[in-house]
Amino acid sequence: MAPRVFLAAIALAAVSACAPQVPDSGQGVGFDNSFEAQQQRDAALSGGQTRLPDTVVPPTPGSAEATAAETTRILAETRPGAPDSPQLNSGVAPVQASPSNPTPATLDNPGISNENDFDAVAERQTIESDAERIANNRAQYEVVQPEALPTRPGDEQPNIVAFALSTSHPKGQSVYARAGFGGESRAARNCAAYASPDLAQIDFLARGGPTRDRKGLDPDGDGYACTWDPAPFRKASEG
């Protein structure tokens, strides 16, 4: 056992002798992350030479960087107010605007109306021409006289609207004589046969009303059959 222990100790000592020595930073186990220590490590790795800053390489002619740089230079040299900048358009790009540039010519387009331009209208029109134009417009007016509405073929039934406007007394006022007893009950039975008071009034007028009441539709003699009332028609005509 003793020889084996001795051989192991010798091997461990040999490995320790081959390991690189860690410089003593004075801070115990670890590394010094200060700026000076970083410079020393960089110098040691580069063979003792100080690292130089990166050299600015000019852009390759024809590249995107060269084109952008040239464009910036041209704009700086030709902008208004720059030294030796042209004050008038030379016709060579880039064309720069300047207050001394000539005013562009105004195109007269006859297809665009200038009726809202007072000066333009005043050159073409006068008070006399306006009066003549108004007189010509008035001469072209044509007044159409109203005519009666045409009668529909086969439509010969009484017009209850015209009848309502031809009367003036209210509903319930007796105007025409009626004879016989039991007129109210008879009118109630006969009026139930009509779908509406308008139809009852039309049939009443067609049978000789308002002076004659053959079916007993107007027992009070006001000239209005069943519950028909001319007041809404009169009101509508008054607007």
Image (tube, rainbow, N blue to C red):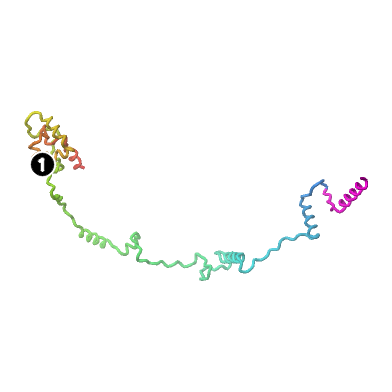
Q: In which quarter of the image is residue 128?
A: bottom left
Q: In which quarter of the image is residue 176?
A: top left
- Identify the element where label 1 is drawn: helix
Q: Quadrant of the C terminus?
A: top left
Q: Give the range drawn in magenta.
A: 1-25
- How many numbered circles does the render carry? 1
Q: With respect to residue 28, does 181 lie above or below?
A: above
Residue visible at 53% across and 69% down in the picture: 93
Q: Between residues 116 and 220, which one lies in front from this camera angle? A: 220
Mark 1 highlights which residue? 206
Relative side of 26 to 189, left or right: right
Q: Between residues 101 and 232, which one lies in front from this camera angle? A: 232
Place of residue 190 in the rendered image (x, y in percent of width and height, measured from the top left): 13, 34
Place of residue 150 in the rendered image (x, y in percent of width and height, measured from the top left): 14, 51
Q: With respect to residue 90, does 150 lie above or below?
A: above
Q: Residue furthest top?
A: 181
Place of residue 139 in the rendered image (x, y in percent of width and height, measured from the top left): 20, 60
Q: Residue furthest right?
A: 2
Relative side of 68 to 132, left or right: right
